[in-house]
Amino acid sequence: MEDREIVDLYFERSESAIIETENKYGKYCRYIAYNILRSESDAEECVNDAYLKVWDSVPPKRPERLSAYVGKITRNVALDRYEKNRAQKRGGGEVALSFEELRECIPSDEKCGESLILKDALNRFLVSLSSEKRKIFVRRYWYFSSVKDISAEYHISQSKVKMTLLRLRNELKEFLQQEDISI
């Protein structure tokens, strides 16, 4: 089923909208949530919570790219759960490592992606990258994939992934400085 048709089901308030969303994007959403939480049961709960948030927000919103919309909501729900787990002295893993890696690049008074100026600069930075570099960057810092998983996915060595990420962080830092975004 096409995204437009699924969104139309949400507007009709048909419960089959959630079923169709699960059929088309369930695996994608669980991937996002699991990479953040590293728990299948927590990931499953987050995906269900995300579907509820989509149900509550469509309508009035009419997302053009349902995959991006559902993915972003899932990511935000999982990050909220991660913060809750971390506050309870559980957690760690790739999310903490990814945030630590970006600490030298992203302004300390900003949460990654929340400032419109920062978001615009990050988008321009990503567009300037080669396809391979952009995919590695996004897999690490959006999907919180491990270096090992990125290495396996793109059939490159872990050391190449680490070096690419280091160079990309340095390039990002320099790019943000050129944009007068203080670090």
Image: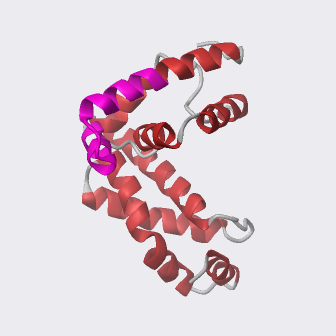
Residue 107 among magenta residues = no
Q: What percent of the width, then of the height, locates residue 181?
A: 67, 17
Q: Position of residue 79 (x, y in %)?
A: 44, 44
Q: Is residue 23 above or below residue 89?
A: below
Q: Nearer the viewer, residue 140 or 131?
A: 131
Give the quarter of the image for residue 54.
bottom right
The quarter of the image holding the N terminus is: bottom right
Q: Residue at x 73, y 65 (%)?
A: 61
The residue nearer to you, when weighing 138 against 70, is: 138
* Residue 88 in sight in this render: no
Q: Is residue 152 magenta?
A: yes
Residue 34, given in percent of the width and then of the height, sits at: 32, 53
The boundaries of the magenta stretch are: 146-168
Q: Residue at x 67, y 31 (%)?
A: 115
**Residue 146 seen from this side:** yes
Q: Residue at left 64%, top 79%? A: 10
Q: Quadrant of residue 167?
A: top left
Instruction: Indicate the quadrant where residue 45 lies.
Output: bottom left
Relative side of 100 to 129, left or right: left
In the displayed structure image, the side of residue 13 where residue 51 appears, left or right: left
Left or right side of 155 for 125:
right
Above/below status of 57 relative to 122: below
Residue 85: x %, y % from top left: 32, 42
The answer to whether 6 is drawn above or below residue 29 in the figure is below
The main secondary structure of the magenta stretch is helix
User: What is the quadrant of the C terminus in the image?
Assistant: top right
